[in-house]
Image (cartoon, coloured by chain):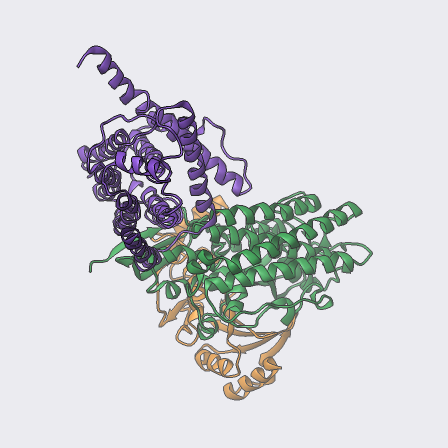
Chain colours: A green, B orange, C purple
Amino acid sequence: MSRITVPIGPQHPLLKEPLSFLVSLEGEKVMDSTLRLGYVHRGIEKLAEQRTYIQNVYLIERICGICSHIHSTTYCQSVEALLKLEVPKRGLYIRMLLCELERIHSHLLWLGVLAKNIGLNTLFMYAWRDREIVLNIMEEISGGRVSHAVNIIGGVRVDLNDKHLSLLQEGLRELTIRVEEILRAIESDRSFRARTRKIGYLSLEDIKRYCVVGPVARASGLDIDIRRDAPYAAYNELSFEVPLMTEGDVWARSILRILETIQAIRLCTQIIHNLPDGPVSVSAPRKVPSGEVVSRAEAPRGEVFYYLRSDGSQKPARLKVRTPTLTTLITLPGQLKNMQLADVSAVIAGVDLCIACGDR
Amino acid sequence: MNIEKAVKKLQEVLNLDRSSTKLMPMNETEITISKQQILLAVKTILNSKIWHLSAITCQQIEDGFTLLYHFWKSGGLTLRIRLDENKPQIESICSLIPGAEYYEREAREMFGIEFHGMPNPIPLLLPDNWQGGYPMRKKELPSNEEHNSKTSQKKGKSL
Amino acid sequence: MDNMNLLGLLFRIFIFPGFFFLLIAALFLHWLDRKLIARFQGRIGPPWYQPLADLVKLFAKEDILPSGTNLFFAALLPLISFASVLTASFYLPIAIQSAPSFQGDFIVLMFLLSLPSLMYFLAGWVTQGVYSVIGGNRSLLQYFSYEVLFLLAMSGTAIASGSWSLADIRLAQIKESPYIFPQIVGFLFSLAGLIGKLKREPYDIPKAKSEVIAGALTEFSGKKLALWYLTIQLQTVVGLSFLIHCFFSGFWQMSTFSGFIVFLLLLVILQGMLSAISAIYARLRIDQLVYLNWYIFIPLTLLHNVYILLK
């Protein structure tokens, strides 16, 4: 049988961001695939070396349009560690609140993309409709729907008032109902199951070998979550569960992400109930003493990693960013092998790619 | 703790003295090893049930390059390796940790580090017809100065 | 043929129930479809003139095809499918009979309705794009499963009435009762077959956006694409009318105003069913579709037909 090569990307309805995927087919069966990044490479690591620590907070936020807050959180954490700054409790809580809201927003967005890719447009519309609730809350708190610019070195820029809290409570209550409804729907829907079960399987061994993180790893049974294993901010003061599945396919990843969304809603509720009083930030010096630091945080897609080296000046000497998308991208060719062309869309959506994160 | 055990094991296997190990902020331990020891060190780490490689950081310092291999298991473990300025090259660890492929490819493109035994030595982020040298380097090496001079001048202006 | 007769014939072909009426009905049903799906999904949906506006805009757009395409065939294929659907409509007694019924027009109608799918496959072949070819191949794969299902399920009515003529099927229903009651299973499977014909979700495999862009029509643009879209929209009306004729005749008197209203109502209800099915199900995979049709739907339909024969 002769092979044909189907290009998926850099412009393709399947991908919301540019990524080039060459899939070679025999009939409808995927025999091989090659992957090419770099279409949205902006050289952020290099740019960061030309800017001051404060300017970098805003640059770093532009790495990703979906998980912008977690990037600036991890960056600020590393700078604060070098400065030996103690961020006030209230500041940390607001940071965590935004992180968890972002997780809800990211997971619902992802669910919509997956649903669209397998032709279930109704679920896509529902998921994105419910996502509006979170976006509106975040807009009310920070003034931005996806780029919040909430973090500053030494704390956060905004404080929560009573109006925010009541809005949050109301929104979270509504969201709990909606998300539980979605969970019921996708657990019972047969056509959803038919398109996602046993698709894009990754075994626990593969996960370990490829150092995969986040929901994709947890859906294959690897119990890893930075929030619990190496708590940053004030996660050690909150109680939450880390959902775990063992099926390792797209279906498991979907259910797991919805369960995580429910946990994130719980966390948000805890945060607004236990919100400490006091200032939200401390002032930070412009110059950072020389040193090196490694900082990690749990983004919606998994562990995000920052390495920062300071040489004592106002600008970082080296900033390294490793995003969770890079770890899942590398598993894609393996997942796609011997799949049908129709499943390519489900697999690519299933790992929740953020190409802008991957390219930086 | 896994990390402490692994550090002890590493010191034992690689014959390192205590001065090679130091603590970094945020629960991170750092060990300096030489580049010939990399495969042995990674094997030792994998044997102590630490399989997660977070990233490989490459950077250019005054007189050479450093590679940092960041491992993680509820705590960080970083391997620090100095590379020679004129011939930055090292063994690839992709045979042990396939997940390291993209990190090594990135370091290769951005800094020009040669990884021996790399499975897929094609560009990852830069265009296929990229002529501009190694974008993340801070200064040019004496040997390829001529090759890069034109593009680096252009870059300097745009930045 | 005298003048009055000729005028009447032309009126029937071009105005009612011919081309003009079909066009209005097609655009209306298309709007209804989009509006209903939008409401099911919690959206507002387009205004009533949107399908017409889309069509006018597409007709005004530049017509581009990739180099190496056989321009003659690329122009011919949408025309053939358009013509075949229009011809099919003349055999269908929508309110009044346009062409005289004869023994076997049931089969002719079946054939005319399946022509566009073949043309669709050829369109993918002619334009040569990689997505077009895959889309065309998929449509052919799908063709064998839903076409058989559609024919078998629909022929239940012909078996029951003992004739392959549409007029006889109608007469038999008026004499006894509409076939929807005794043949509800056949009706449902016919609807499934029709969904496959129209390439609607969950049978929209040949034009799955996230996999093959727009399938065989990826490279088409401008007038030709507009003609393809119009064909599919007309096919919806004709297909649904065919179903109504074979399963619901006997509810109304032909060529009376109230009968016409009942017919339109049925059209709207069936379109509503199609929209609901589109909104509920995810797209099937080609192997799942073939399995579903050949292992479950078609054997059941055969059993159903045997039951009708024995009764």
Residue at the far top: name it: C3
State which quadrant residue A225 falls in. bottom right
Which residue is farthest right?
A: A277
From the viewer's perspective, tell me whether residue B122 is left or right of residue C5.
right
Image coordinates for residue C236, horizontal then vertical, percent: 35, 36
Quarter where residue C258 is shown: top left
B55 shown above or below A11: below
**Image: A68 above or below C220:** below
Q: x, y (%) of residue A116?
A: 46, 49
Residue A126 in the image, given as x and y percentages of width and height: 55, 47
Can residue B36 be spotted in the picture? yes
Query: On the rendered image, what quadrant is the N terminus of chain C found in?
Result: top left
Residue under the point 26% across and 29% down: C90
Q: Can you give x and y, in whole percent of width and height, for residue A76 in the image?
A: 65, 58
Name the residue nearer the viewer: C146 or C92. Answer: C92
In this orientation, which residue lies closer to the viewer: A318 or C94?
C94
The number of numbered discs placed on residues in the rendered structure image is: 0
Drawn side of residue C29 relative to residue C206, left or right: right
Q: Nearer the viewer, residue C298 or C113?
A: C298
Q: Is residue C2 above or below residue B123?
A: above
Q: Nearer the viewer, residue A196 or C144?
A: C144
Q: Is residue A146 visible?
A: no
At a point 49% along the width and 60% down the height, the residue shown is A325
Tell me the residue at 49%/57% (across/down).
A189
